Amino acid sequence: MLPLAPVRCLLLAATASLLAAQPQPPPILLGGAWYPEQWPESRWDADLQLMQAAGIRMVRIGEFAWSSMEPREGQYTLDWVDRAIAAAARHKIFTVLGTPTDAPPAWLTQKYPDTLRVDENGRPAQHGSRRQFSYTSPRYRDFSRRIADQMAARFGHNPNVIGWQIGNEYTDDSFDESARRLFHEWLQAKYKTLDELNQRWATAYWSQTYDRWDQIPMGSGRQNPALLLDYKRFVTDQWRAFQRNQLDAIRARADRRQFITTNLGGLGWADRFNRTEISADLDFISWDDYVGQGHLEPYRNGATHDLVRGWKRRNFWVMETQPGSVNWAPVNNALDPGETRAMAWEAVGHGADCVAYWQWRDAPNGQEQYHGAIVGPDGEPLPIYPEIQQIGEEFAKAGAALAGTTPRSEVAILHDYDSRWAIEFQLHSNRYDPVEVLLGYYRPLRDLAQSVDIVDPRAPLNGYKLVVAPSLNVISGDLAAQLLDYVRRGGNLMLGPRSGMKDEFNALHPQRQPGPLAAPLGGRVEQFYALLDSVPVAGEWGEGQAGIWAERLSANSPDTRTVLRYGAGNGWLEGQAAALSRRVGSGTITYIGALLDRDLMRSIAHRMIDAAGVQPVFGPAPEGVEVCRRNGSSRDVFILINHNARTVDVRLPRPMLDILGEGQRVESVHLPPQGVAILQSESRNP
Ligand code: GLA
């Protein structure tokens, strides 16, 4: 009998050679949503041929095909899926399988109406669209697990299936009986006693006191803010359980080689549930990058990629993006020639390892006949096809350089779902948009540092030289301790208005803002003001205007510096402190109490970046040229995108390999409008 160690070695070697024998997807993938069930099988090959010629190496299939996979209860018909995967593989195209649980078949909801979603007014959804299911229904979860299990049993070892997408764009919560029951159980598990809940929620207010769990209402609207915040957390947990149910079924059957992800919609910033938490169970996250009406807004779109990358703090996929136009905006204009390519490279620059188009071809009928596609109803290429083909060629060319690289930043912006919700429940000024506030910080910081992470406040922060929290409304004792630890060790923390007002129960902190960070700041917010008109501010940090929101601050420690003060214009604010800064341990805490105009924000960002010692990842670049860096163990890959309407020349800080050119070393690049350059150099900070 062989000793155990050599046997293990033999097994490992056999597994490695088996894996080596299996086809491997390229590092940067071009993909598309393909719906083989909508077409006669005789047409598949022609479509796949055209996809292959466009450089498409991945198709996502199945996510709306439940009625074709289980036409009658318990009768699974997956042979066609098998044939579609094999047909794609013949064209060197890998498959991502979507579980079809976003669109249940008619027999299911008709026979089991308890699986239907119920809206807040008690109306059940009906068949004919999608998302008509209740995400909490135990029966629906059973059916979902069964179809996921059947699919995984059949395709979990298929070498051409590289991964799984669970459901699609989790969206609507439900107000059916099972959801209410679960909400009450959830609250009971959290608070244990009604006394505790009544106290944390301050239910003496408006006589809300509860003496039975089932008295507690469920929903949005004008409820108690504590209830609203808990409801969002409940919704998050329910979607996570909905996902976990299928994830476990797939994991139990599928090769570890196959990844499991989902596709998050809502244009990235949607906050129906906590996306950091939903991402936790997945191998990586993917999202839908749509512009809708208008054109690519590089900062907003780039920031959205950074937000998505922050959910798992790793590279992600763009599972859907528009080939030209969508069908759901007020005006569904097309992106300009070259803009789709610029958008694809922006995604990769911010950490996407796949960009997939929705969709390959419009169904002959159905609700989305007008949506952008790559081939027309005749099955022939549409005008966008050559641009997609160019992206495919470039992804293939740049893949080796980009393999194993990821963006790395010295600056982080904190995005916190609890805080977003807490502010959105009580905006106080309908001009205060927490996402716009975040973007107000992002733009100048991105320009100066050329790489910014957007992360959850509970993420490890020690690697960042500068951490900015634009509206960190909810700061628990634990979070305050973590932030303070970051500062004491040399970090620079900049808090924006509305920070530190609430605890984790959405209750007002007994001390004023920024709550538990007021003492370390050596100052506090005396009062907040929603502004109708702007107010001038000036001080050692420059001068400008405060608008929308302004807080009157006061310093109560001799070493807390008042770096901005309000001028005349609002009697409550006149002459009062608008921004404070203090050294704490080896770092600094800064509190900015107002929303400031763009120029002043830029000069503050400059100051903070300089003081924190943040280096731009590339160096000087002309205005309107977006610089992205992906860092590998021994190399940096820069992606430069010209968003200007004119041609620009960019001098490189050092000679670099021009990946999309002939692979020669260059010292400058010439970028036409929408032009892209991919440049490789040795890494400066691996
Ligand atoms: C979403 C969905 C797709 C499709 C597109 C249209 O992203 O996931 O099924 O409806 O929108 O833009």
Image (cartoon, helix red, strand yellow):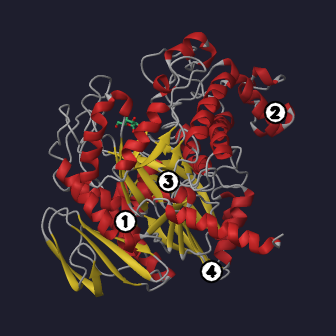
Height in image: 134 above or below 559? above
Q: CA distance from mark 2 to mark 1?
A: 45 Å
Q: Nearer the viewer, residue 259 or 4?
A: 4
- Tell me where residue 498 appears, x and y as whole percent: 55, 53
| Mark 4 or mark 3: whose residue is earlier in sequence | 4
Residue at (29, 54) in percent of width and height: 297
Pointer 1 with pointer 3, Cβ within 8 A: no
Q: Which residue is mark 4?
A: 490
Q: Residue furthest front?
A: 1
Q: Which residue is mark 2?
A: 188
Q: Which residue is mark 3?
A: 572
Q: Residues within 10 Å of mark 1 (few under 14, many from 20)?
A: many
- The amino acid type found where label 4 is placed reads Gly
Q: Nearer the viewer, residue 439 or 510?
A: 439
Q: Which residue is mark 1?
A: 349
| Mark 1 or mark 4: whose residue is earlier in sequence | 1
Quadrant in the rendering for residue 223: top right
Height in image: 35 above or below 393? above
